[in-house]
Image (cartoon, rainbow, N blue to C red):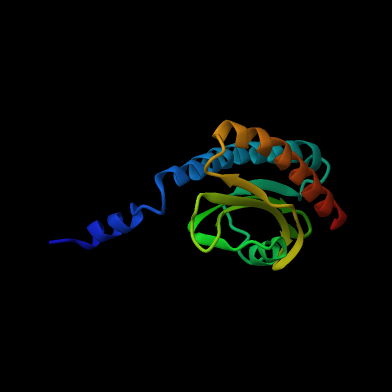
Amino acid sequence: MTTVADEVRAARNRPSGLPEWENARVSAERLHSFVRQRLDSLAAQMKDEISSAQPSYRFNVVSVSPLIVLPEAIKSLLVQPALADFDQNMSLVLKTEKQSLLSLAQFAVGPRFYGLIGAVMTLSEGMSLIWHSDLFLINYREPTEHAEKRFRPWLEEALAQGLAAWRKTL
């Protein structure tokens, strides 16, 4: 006799396509860890340099999805996300007189997961999308090290552009 727990486990562990497609997930998860480190470092830098002059300003990192604005950004990038198959998010909270989120969203691209993962950085304020980056793509055939080598400069450029857009809202 099967139990509810057995069925939940089976659904969780179901193959989502060809085994080699999982390489894209592995790469995306590694890049997600790198993003967390980079955003933690950036939040600490902003606390040291900005909060010391503006004590009411707060900066911290959370695993919050920009779900309200993400569809608008994805629509303009002309991709179809499969959020049920892969969806990871990380946000830098920028709390000044108002609160903004500088967020990285990673998602499966296509009607379902086919070994392609997209990443986009967004800047949002409340329910409004202020800015979004270009799309970064990770595919299952690319070695993780190569994806990371491409991702690092993309992330730095996206952070710089996102912070420039945020600064204009102050």
Quarter residue 168 falls in: bottom right
Q: Is residue 135 left or right of residue 1?
A: right
Q: Residue furthest left?
A: 1
Please indicate whether residue 116 sits to the left or right of residue 169 in the image: left
Instruction: Judge by depth and name the residue closer to the eye, 51 or 164.
Output: 164
**How many marks on residues?**
0
Residue 84 is situated, as x and y percent measured from the top left of the image, at: 47, 61
Near-viewer residue (72 or 144): 144
In this rendering, position of residue 47 left or right of residue 145: right
Rendered image quadrant of residue 19 = top left
What quarter of the picture does the C terminus occupy? bottom right
Q: Is residue 155 visible?
A: yes
Q: As rendered, which of 106 and 44 lies closer to the eye? A: 106
Residue at image position (61%, 33%) is 146
Q: Residue at x 55, y 50 (%)?
A: 116
Q: Is residue 134 above or below residue 2?
A: above
Residue 34 x, y percent position in the rendering: 60, 37
Q: Position of residue 164 (x, y in %)?
A: 84, 49
Front position in the image: 97 or 10:
10
Q: Residue at x 12, y 61 (%)?
A: 1
x, y (%) of residue 129? 74, 64
User: Is residue 104 visible to the viewer in this orientation of the structure?
Assistant: no
